[in-house]
Image (cartoon, grey):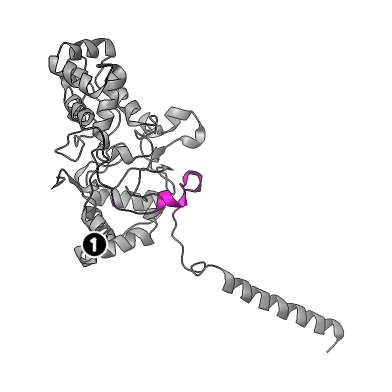
Amino acid sequence: MSLSKTRLWITAGAGAILLVLALLLLPADWLAPRDTAIEPAAFAQPASAAAVAPVPSPPDLPPARVALGERLFRDPRLSADQTLACAGCHDLARGGVDRLPVSIGVGGSKGGINAPTVFNAGLNFVQFWDGRAATLEEQAAGPIHSEIEMASDWARILPRLKADGEYVRDFVTAYPDGITATNVLDAIASFERTLVTPNSRFDRYLNGESAVFTADELEGYQRFRDYGCTSCHQGRLLGANMYQKFGAVRDYYLHRPITKADLGRYNVTGRDEDRHVFKVPSLRNVAVTAPYFHDASAATLEQAVVVMGRHQLGRDLGQRDVAQIVAFLRTLTGEWRGKVLE
């Protein structure tokens, strides 16, 4: 063998050895089949935010403010014509929603987007589908002033409250400066922060009660993770801690006209990259908060899972996949005031 051929053989052999060593050092799942989901790197949260954990117990807040907030939450005097309360669109006996495609405001006006649940809203990283409110106080002010919701203002609301002797007394008890717009919003937000729903069967599973799941529910949770649903539905709420584009893999809007609500976060920022980007909804209590998505286009959980598989993961899920994932999702219904939500 010539010297040049010998050198070539040695070089090729060394290269093959290096390639094998490199493959051995790669992560164990590198060669495994990949999901078609697009990783939401641009919107990802820190690892601590992504960790799945049980819903916590309600926070310990001043009882006088919480009680006042609940009363205000249910009071139609906050609306212009005194017919609509916060609870009208966020019915606490119906999963914290009204179960309508869009909510009905004063005078029969219709909203432009499906109302999200108020339960666990205090654990969201932002409020509204498009994230335009950073806090519950900001969120509470939105519907009050919206022309298609409560269509009201403080010039109407504050005199009404000040004419009510019980409100005057209770506000002074809860707030040294009495009835003000800031205190109204703080009281409502304080009450809403107590609307957490712990002790779902999933929470019990996370706390070590493995027998609480049926075989189908357990398999559904496994598929939920294996198919990549947890890339967006993560953290304590299985969502509500990041933004993501609706239609990340397949165009969700291809065969229908686009509405203003479909533009999502673009309506807040005006940036092209935010078109069709929304706060990822929490999956907590999802079994009792139909219809689904910002446009209420899915009437059932089964339909919603099929759409998510197709447009977010690039997968056409089979009937068994769908049934088992839905079985898992039904374990996410928690309790409020010791009663499972219905």
- The quarter holding residue 208 reads bottom left
Taking the spot 47% from the left edge, 47% from the top edge, the residue there is 44
- The quarter holding residue 222 reads bottom left
Q: Is residue 46 magenta?
A: yes
- Please state the horizontal and vertical placement of residue 117, each as a whole percent of the image: 25, 38
Residue at the outermost right position? 3
Give the main secondary structure of the magenta stretch: loop
Q: Is residue 74 above or below residue 226?
A: above
Q: Is residue 89 left or right of residue 146?
A: left
Q: Is residue 341 magenta?
A: no
- The quarter holding residue 166 reads top left
Q: Is residue 113 above or below residue 340?
A: above
Between residues 184 and 328, which one lies in front from this camera angle? 184
Between residues 7 and 211, which one lies in front from this camera angle? 211
Q: Amino acid at mark 1?
A: Glu
Whether residue 321 can be seen here: no
Identify the element where label 1 is drawn.
helix
Residue ID for mark 1: 217
Q: Is residue 239 left or right of residue 70?
A: right
Q: Look at the image and tell me in which quarter the N terminus lies.
A: bottom right
Taking the spot 24% from the left edge, 39% from the top edge, the residue there is 119
Q: Is residue 174 above or below residue 245?
A: above
Whether residue 292 can be seen here: yes
- Please state the horizontal and vertical placement of residue 12, each as a whole percent of the image: 73, 78
- Please state the horizontal and vertical placement of residue 190, each as a whole percent of the image: 27, 31
Count of marks placed on residues: 1
Taking the spot 21% from the left edge, 50% from the top edge, the residue there is 333
Q: Look at the image and tell me in which quarter the C terminus lies.
A: top left
Q: Which residues are magenta?
A: 36-54
Between residues 72 and 178, which one lies in front from this camera angle? 178
